[in-house]
Amino acid sequence: MRMPAAKKVKSLPPADVEAIFARFHEIEPEPKGELDYVNAFTLLVAVVLSAQATDAGVNKATKRLFQLAPSPAAMAALGVEGIEAEIKTIGLFRNKAKNVFALSQQLLERHGGEVPADRGSLEALPGVGRKTANVVLNIWFKQPTIAVDTHLFRVGNRTGLAVADNPLAVEQILLKVVPERFMLHAHHWLILHGRYICKARRPECWRCPIREWCRYEPKTPAPNGA
């Protein structure tokens, strides 16, 4: 996964990292992802479909898909064309349909129709990379993983929480610096912060709850009338 270059800032000291996650926890103790799912399998499919697509767009497409095929067996029975017909509003839907069909078959053939709880087995599935595996491990299996998408990569580098030039390095830094008691929800807090406040083109610094610790400069002023 290629990420945009980030302006280098100094890494935050441990006390500031602790303060940032304490503030996130204070605001939203139990952050949730925004993809809809009904079980581990539909979560996996939703995350695979979310690559280069919005969560809202994926949810719209999967509402009927998950009614028709909430299990690997039902999804495989739809076939590639049947899956395509349900997800054609999502970008790259043809390739994604092939991956969803193939991963459904592999789950049936190699895992008894169950979603595996280990990274290696997940990443061996078609269309499943490290980020997707981390999301499933975190949300469904409650493992303290960090799923680095473009939002989290941007927030890590802008704030000084994790200054690095590739997603894996950002992930590894966060696994070291985030206090253990905040680790389970860390990636949700950071992704949602990047999606709604620390935006790519114009971060909304004037309403940022962690601005006092953030290294990003100059802070974006409030628009007129805000």
Image (tube, rainbow, N blue to C red):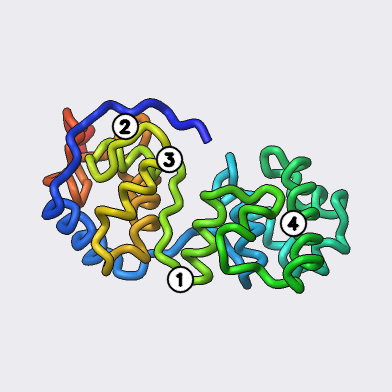
Front: mark 3 or 2: 3
What is the secondary structure assignment of the residue under circle 3?
Answer: helix
Q: CA distance from mark 3 to mark 1?
A: 21 Å
Residue tagged 3: 167
Q: CA distance from mark 1 to mark 2?
A: 33 Å
- Residues at badges 3 and 2 in contact (C-beta under 8 Å)? no
Q: CA distance from mark 3 to mark 4?
A: 24 Å
The 10 Å Cα crowd at callout 1, few under 14, some 14 to 19, many 20 or more, is: few
Q: Residue at x 20, y 34 (%)?
A: 216
Q: Which mark is residue 202?
A: 2
Residue tagged 1: 142
Residue 187 visible in the current orientation: yes
Mark nearer the N terminus (2 vs 4): 4
Residue tagged 4: 103
The 10 Å Cα crowd at callout 3, few under 14, some 14 to 19, many 20 or more, is: many
Q: Amino acid at mark 4?
A: Leu
Using the image as rendered, state which of residue 120 and residue 78 is in the foreground.
120
Mark nearer the N terminus (3 vs 4): 4
Q: Is residue 139 above or below residue 51?
A: below
- Residues at badges 3 and 4 in contact (C-beta under 8 Å)? no
Residue 224 visible in the current orientation: no
Q: CA distance from mark 2 to mark 4?
A: 38 Å
Q: CA distance from mark 3 to mark 2?
A: 22 Å
